[in-house]
Image: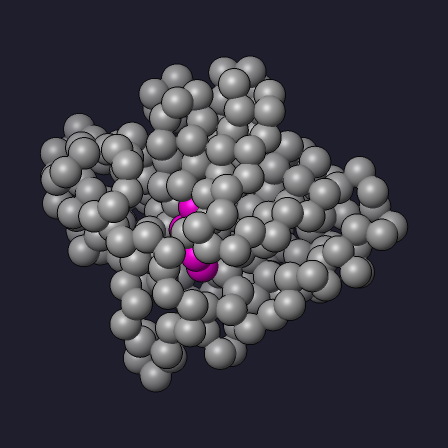
Amino acid sequence: MSISIKYLGHSSFLLTIDKKNILTDPFFKNDSLGKMERLVPCHHKVEDLPKIDSILISHEHTDSFDKDSVNYLSKKYNPKIISHYSILKDIEGLEHNKVSIEEYQSKDINNINIQALPAHHPGAFYPLSFLIKNKKGKTVYFAGDTYMTKDHDTIKPDIALLPIGGKRTMDLGTAIRVMKKMRPKFVIPMHYDTFEDIKRNPQELIYRFGKNYTDVNTVILNPGKTFKFKN
């Protein structure tokens, strides 16, 4: 059984793990955010998503927590919504589907273990990263919006989803430092090119890192493309 990772754009992924669909940091709006014009639209309309079993929300900023889309999915599919309690109170839907989680807590959701880890994202109230583990012990690290943290010294995921765009998150250089610490089997960059001030060339991860560390594979996904990792 494989782990399937479909990139929807920005920090939004559709993860299919043990036949369960997990959505990360939903951001389906193609409107401008203040003065920032969205340059790369979301690949999917929220209405076209398959059944969503769980939603992970790393923090409260609009480009990670598209409230209208989360409320739509909550009513349509009754997914488990995993986030800090300060976010859950703003979501419509059944209370028993809201799963409050804090740093270093773990929750078993649909037989998948989800651990919340600290994130460092200035300007966010309670930012989190997530380590997702399937029944066979294979792990996906979803960084959310974060700089490098001390936990990157000890996390050893099979797959790491890392921001590279900068602006109060990792930039390319920091992402490479984190890759050297974690040494995942695969790295998928995210949180870049969506807006003018986070335009980056993800190929630099290969140029600056991959040639010297052949045990780590960089997978660059265009929005709408899927990567499959076999257990």
Q: Quadrant of residue 43?
A: bottom left
The residue shown at (64%, 68%) is 201
Query: Along the line of sight, which residue is nearer the eye, 164 or 98?
Result: 164
Where residue 145 appears, x then y in whole percent? 49, 57
The residue shown at (79%, 60%) is 207
The residue shown at (39%, 17%) is 111
Where residue 114 appears, x then y in whole percent? 44, 30
Figure check: 131 above or below 8: above
Q: Main secondary structure of the magenta part?
A: strand
User: Does residue 127 appear to the left or right of 174 in the view shown?
Assistant: left
Residue extent of the magenta highlight: 9-13
User: Does residue 128 appear to the left or right of 138 in the view shown?
Assistant: left
User: Does residue 184 appear to the left or right of 128 in the view shown?
Assistant: right
Query: Along the line of sight, which residue is nearer the eye, 93 or 147?
Result: 93
Res 192 seen here: yes
Figure check: 202 above or below 56: below
